[in-house]
Image (tube, rainbow, N blue to C red):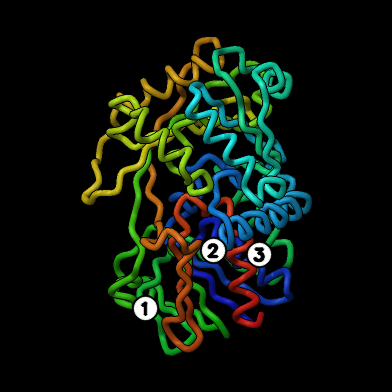
């Protein structure tokens, strides 16, 4: 079988990986010289802890298993099973963490509630103030800025993979072929469109009422911390944005404890993970209303800096870079991804939202299974 994958991000690349692993030939087409969207502009977190119950957490747990296998085969991914700590500061945040422990899938996620001393034993860099920590053992991390390059190198070694950069697909031709802006037609037995947050042009023509929206966020990365941050770190505000924590305890938290004005305005939470060079990737904000702002706002970064310094008990290293990113999210929050057949041999796969890096291996596996690869 010959599979045409449109899109060079992590979802597209994982579809290419599945096809190659199953013995097929793949042509992957990317409109940029390299993928530049959400697949690079993220934390690199394999984030099981906050996923909704049922299909979503099952997908995340399967993806976590697949990531570990891919990471063993491709060391350049930088896969590491570092787990996470969500640090709580108030009694109501603690109540949300305690409610998470009562979930029927708590053991599968690897939840434990730790006292401050236990959390610091696990992550000694956390010398600041917090009252408890929700540990999720199943969380992990990869290196988002280099993951696609490492995966592509492994795919090329198969001898059955071709990467076509700098080509924008303009048209689906027949049932399982596409034509790019160079005038070339790429024909296969199946076409998978993994276009991420690029929802205009061809995607709009194929699915005018696509139930997917775009979300913008801001992030930053620091110089090396100078010591290991042995787990990913989140704050209690993250409870407000992840479906795993919904329930009476969260309702009481949101009713009784407002976020700071800056955090509320920008729908903020702290997520933080250390890169292999020792720097920290820190974020994030959420912006849903179009048109998105074109500028990078400073207030959210000041808020995040204060939160991080409070947990670390030390000044943050100098910020090396700041950026904004946009990802595609299903408008139905119960859907992990939007997968739609748009021609007899052509499928559109998009909209995983903030779950793209986490769930992409399992999303691609499901596509491959459903298409009979």
Is 109 or 12 nearer to us in this picture? 109
Quarter of the figure with the C terminus = bottom right
Contact, mark 1 vs mark 3 (Cβ under 8 Å)? no
Compare marks 1 and 3 and give the one earlier in the sequence: 3
Q: Which residue is mark 1?
A: 171
Q: Is residue 258 at all visible to an observer of this figure?
A: yes
Q: Residue at x 46, y 81 (%)?
A: 341
**Image disc number at residue 17:** 3
- SS of the residue at dot 3? helix
Mark nearer the N terminus (3 vs 2): 2
Q: Position of residue 71 (x, y in %)?
A: 73, 49
Q: Is residue 197 left or right of 20 when viewed as pictured?
A: left
Q: Alpha-carbon distance for marks 1 and 3?
A: 24 Å
The image shows residue 370, relative to residue 305, as above or below, that is below
Which numbered dot is residue 12? 2
Q: Which is more toward the observer, 158 or 106?
A: 106
Q: Which mark is residue 122?
A: none
Q: Residue at coordinates 45% horizontally, 39% vertically from top-left?
A: 250
Choose the circle earlier in sequence order: 2 or 1.
2
Give the left or right position of residue 7, taking residue 115 as reference. Answer: left
Mark 3 and mark 2: Cα distance apart in space: 9 Å
Which of discs 1 and 3 lies nearer the camera? The answer is 3
Direction right: furthest residue: 72
Identify the residue at image location x=21%, y=50%: 291
Image marks 3 and 2: residues in contact by CB distance under 8 Å = no
Can the viewer see residue 275? Answer: no
């Amino acid at each position: 079988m010959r599979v045409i994958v449109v899109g060079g991000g992590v979802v597209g690349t994982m579809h290419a990986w599945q096809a190659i692993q199953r013995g097929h030939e793949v042509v992957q087409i990317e409109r940029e010289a390299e993928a530049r969207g959400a697949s690079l502009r993220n934390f690199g977190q394999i984030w099981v802890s906050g996923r909704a119950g049922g299909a979503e957490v099952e997908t995340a747990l399967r993806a976590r298993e697949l990531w570990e296998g891919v990471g063993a085969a491709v060391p350049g991914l930088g896969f590491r099973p570092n787990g996470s700590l969500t640090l709580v500061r108030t009694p109501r945040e603690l109540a949300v963490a305690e409610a998470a422990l009562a979930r029927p899938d708590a053991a599968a996620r690897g939840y434990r509630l730790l006292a401050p001393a236990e959390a610091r034993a696990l992550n000694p860099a956390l010398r600041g103030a917090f009252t408890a920590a929700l540990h999720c053992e199943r969380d992990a991390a990869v290196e988002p800025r280099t993951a696609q390059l490492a995966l592509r190198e492994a795919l090329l070694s198969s001898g059955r993979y071709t990467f076509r950069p700098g080509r924008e697909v303009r048209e689906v031709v027949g049932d399982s072929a596409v034509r790019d802006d160079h005038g070339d037609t790429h024909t296969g037995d199946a076409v998978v469109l993994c276009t991420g947050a690029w929802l205009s042009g061809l995607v709009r023509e194929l699915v005018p009422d696509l139930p997917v929206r775009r979300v913008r966020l801001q992030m930053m990365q620091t110089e090396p911390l100078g010591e290991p941050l042995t787990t990913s770190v989140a704050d209690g505000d993250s409870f407000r944005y992840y479906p795993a924590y919904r329930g009476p305890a969260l309702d009481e938290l949101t009713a009784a404890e407002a976020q700071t004005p800056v955090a509320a305005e920008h729908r903020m939470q702290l997520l933080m993970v250390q890169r292999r060079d020792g720097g920290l990737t820190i974020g994030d904000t959420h912006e849903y209303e179009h048109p998105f702002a074109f500028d990078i706002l400073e207030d959210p970064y000041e808020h995040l800096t204060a939160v991080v310094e409070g947990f670390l008990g030390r000044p943050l290293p100098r910020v090396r870079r700041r950026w904004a990113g946009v990802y595609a999210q299903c408008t139905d929050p119960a859907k992990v991804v939007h997968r739609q057949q748009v021609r007899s041999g052509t499928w559109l796969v998009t909209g995983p939202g903030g779950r793209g890096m986490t769930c992409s291996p399992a999303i691609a596996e499901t596509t491959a299974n459903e298409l009979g690869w």
